Amino acid sequence: MPPDFQDLADQLTLDNIPVVGIGLALIAAVLLALGTQFQHRGVALVEASSGSEAKTGLSFTQLRSLLARPSWVAGTLLLGLAVVLQLTSLGFAPLIVVQPLGAVALVITAIVNSRVTRVPLDRISIRAIVICVVGVGAFVTIAAFVAQSHPITARQLVTVLIILAVVLAAFVTLFIIMRNRKPRPIFYVIAAGVLFGFVVTLAKVVIDRLKTVAFTDFEFDSSDILTILCLVGLATAALLGMYFVQTAHSSNPPDLVVAGLTVIDPLVAVSIGVIVLGEAAGAPWWAIIAFGLAAAAAIWGVISLSRHHPQALANTAFADAAEEKLPQDLLPKADSPTDKEHSHRD
């Protein structure tokens, strides 16, 4: 057996697998799926009651109306609990191990959304979801055995913050430019996924720093200024990411929104973990190649889902073409009077 594979075989013991971190991440994925479904319903009802679409960004009035929707509030609480569990899992396992597990939420959301909307997924969409999950699953399986957390240096922290500042400036600029246009529906999905990738990375940094402070009898030094900047960056990215998520709900099916959050998000976080934080510095050559192939497969799955999902097609310029190709019973149906009555009571 080659040395690299022999080393891997020696590591395949339960003691070396971050079981607690993986378990918490899986529970968080389930809550993420349910919370997203509820939030999607809340945004749809606010659009219906206001009589205006939010495809170019939610207005202040629409944001305020969301707070009065029980479905949206319930979804937000579930997502909040999911975030807490996900951040807790980072204290038990490397970021590149637990973060990709959110892909489980994609499968759950796809099933729930199909049942709720009565819009069956076609074969292409199902294939895209399977490829996303397999790609992320392969990634996390390899990462579970080769990834290691390391103390984060001040230089690494500054690098992450600089990259975040550039990303925030880019997305804010694009958002301002697109306010007067109708952006592609997947824009907000990608933007939210990228921003939440930074949120998780910065959260990991803060958690590790707090653990270090606790072990040193709460001794603070000048480097903790960077930790404060991390908290500011985390809050900024989280708020803008949340806004993009709500806008994404107005023009995308919930499973596509979750695909962005559970595939793009971890890929961004993992890329930072690998390139900047050095969490895979000791990984063998074959693991690096496998990482790249798995990531490429997952990204391809998201792109394919955005192009072929029956509900996503209904919100794009390809809607007419989709109606010609898909049977009528597979297309989203307009709300009936009964549905509207229920929406006012939600």
Image: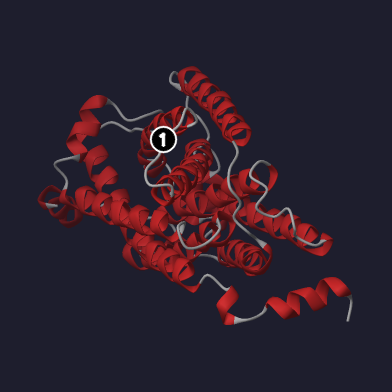
Instruction: Tally the marks.
Output: 1
Query: Taking 162 as reference, is 339 above or below it?
Result: below
Q: Position of residue 24 (x, y in %)?
A: 40, 66
Task: Pick out the residue farthest to the left.
Answer: 345
What is the quadrant of the N terminus in the image?
A: bottom right
Residue beneath disc 1: 220
| Residue at 42% in and 63% down | 29
Q: Is residue 110 left or right of residue 34?
A: right
Q: Position of residue 65 (x, y in %)?
A: 18, 36
Query: Looking at the image, can residue 279 be seen?
Result: yes
Give whichever of 229, 102 is nearer the camera.
229
Mark 1 neighbour density, 10 Å: few (under 14) some (14–19) many (20 or more): few
Give whichever of 156, 255 is nearer the camera.
156
Query: Where on the picture, by quarter, is residue 30?
Result: bottom left
Task: Pick out the residue farthest to the right.
Answer: 2
Give whichever of 19, 256 is nearer the camera.
19
For badge 1, the amino acid type reads Phe
Q: Position of residue 27 (x, y in %)?
A: 38, 67
| Residue at 62% in and 57% down | 301
Instruction: Give the colouring mode of the picture.
Output: secondary structure
